[in-house]
């Protein structure tokens, strides 16, 4: 028997349309598996190539795995049907925990992209400062601190006011959060987006200067492509917030119908589901050395065709 006290008012039957959530789960799980294989391939790289940029790529992969896993749990009909049968306290604890995990990984993603943008900015625009830059020299500790900081900053507001929490058509993701979470979410988007834009704009200007050189060496090309990769995944990541913000606006404006808000939020969830896989595809396309590395570790069988000798037929 479902615990109807935890179902949102507009949810007549929980998981009535399971196809939408099932497809989302499949896309998320596919992205999680791809990113795990991606991290395994990165781990097999020569240790001499494990610079600051390498650890940014690794943490982007980790954040994609974490986010894909949490979103799979968010929309899993079978899991959420079991959860809503629990007691009120157990249901609430589960919902708070899963939302802290989900929003913390999102918050960490923002900060990791800012860190990646800063790393490329210093490496390209201030190359003589790389050896003395405290952030780049302690990048591993900085990236680890990002995860801890994200769980604290997001966890406190999510757990402080749970009156509006309920299981919706999006599973254990509530349709509305508390004001504290909304402020933290909006602030994180604004600050990190602004920082990324400033850093990547300066980096882009320097790349333009590099392009105008008479002869660009292989190192220049590698640096250019790494910066372009960070730029592309930042743009695609922040485009993810467009349907999310539209869904919030539709949901909070009473005069507007609620169905478009639901459709738009599902678009955002589907976008999120393919984002992790898209990151890997872009990285492979823009990193020829990594493509060659993958070819070396994959068991590729080469079939040789022997030429047929000329045989005279009498």
Image (cartoon, grey):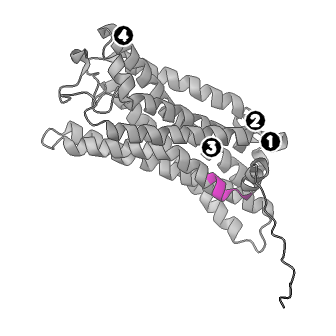
| Number of callouts | 4
Observer-nearest residue: 64 or 78?
78
| Front tag of 4 and 3 | 4
Q: CB of mark 1 within 8 Å of CB of mark 2?
A: yes
Q: Position of residue 104 (x, y in %)?
A: 49, 28
Q: Which residue position is annotated with label 4? A: 90
Q: Which residue is drawn at 66% across and 62% down?
A: 207
C-alpha separation, residue under disc 3 versus residue under disc 1:
17 Å
Q: Quadrant of residue 131?
A: top right
**Of marks 4 and 1, the one in the foreground:** 4
Mark 4 vs mark 1: which is more N-terminal? 4
Q: What distance separates the C-alpha of mark 4 from that of mark 3?
A: 39 Å
Q: What element carries label 3?
A: helix
**Residue labelled with disc 1:** 131
Could you tell me which secondary element the residue under label 4 belongs to? helix
| Magenta residues, dominant SS class | helix
Q: Contact (CB < 8 A) between labels 4 and 1?
A: no
For the N terminus, the quadrant is top left
Residue 294 visible in the shown view: yes
Q: How far apart are marks 4 and 1 (CA)?
A: 51 Å
- Judge by depth and name the residue closer to the eye, 204 or 129: 204
Residue corresponding to mark 3? 116
**Mark 1 / mark 2, whichever is N-terminal:** 1
């Amino acid at each position: 028997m479902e615990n109807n006290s935890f179902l949102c008012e507009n949810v007549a039957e929980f998981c009535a349309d399971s196809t939408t959530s099932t497809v989302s789960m499949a896309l998320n799980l596919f992205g999680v598996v791809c990113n795990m294989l991606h991290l395994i391939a990165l781990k097999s790289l020569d240790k001499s190539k494990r610079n600051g940029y390498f650890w940014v790529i690794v943490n982007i992969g980790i954040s994609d795995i974490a986010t894909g896993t949490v979103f799979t749990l968010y929309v899993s009909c079978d899991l959420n049907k079991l959860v809503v049968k629990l007691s009120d306290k157990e249901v609430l604890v589960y919902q708070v925990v899963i939302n802290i995990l989900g929003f913390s990984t999102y918050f960490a993603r923002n900060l990791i992209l800012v860190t990646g943008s800063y790393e490329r900015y210093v490496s390209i625009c201030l190359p003589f400062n790389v050896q003395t830059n405290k952030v780049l020299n302690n990048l591993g500790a900085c990236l680890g601190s990002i995860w801890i900081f994200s769980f604290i900053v997001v966890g406190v507001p999510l757990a402080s006011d749970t009156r509006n929490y309920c299981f919706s058509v999006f599973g254990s993701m509530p349709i509305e959060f508390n004001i504290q979470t909304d402020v933290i979410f909006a602030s994180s988007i604004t600050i990190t987006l602004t920082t990324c834009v400033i850093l990547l704009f300066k980096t882009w200007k320097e790349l333009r200067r590099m392009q105008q050189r008479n002869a660009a060496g292989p190192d220049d090309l590698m640096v250019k492509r790494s910066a372009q990769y960070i730029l592309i995944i930042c743009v695609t990541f922040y485009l993810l917030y467009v349907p999310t913000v539209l869904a919030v606006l539709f949901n909070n404006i009473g005069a507007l119908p609620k169905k478009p808000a639901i459709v738009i939020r599902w678009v955002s969830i589907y976008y999120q589901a393919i984002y992790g896989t898209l990151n890997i595809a872009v990285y492979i396309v823009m990193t020829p050395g990594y493509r060659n590395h993958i070819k070396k570790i994959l068991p590729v069988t080469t079939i040789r065709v022997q030429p047929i000798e000329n045989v005279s037929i009498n």
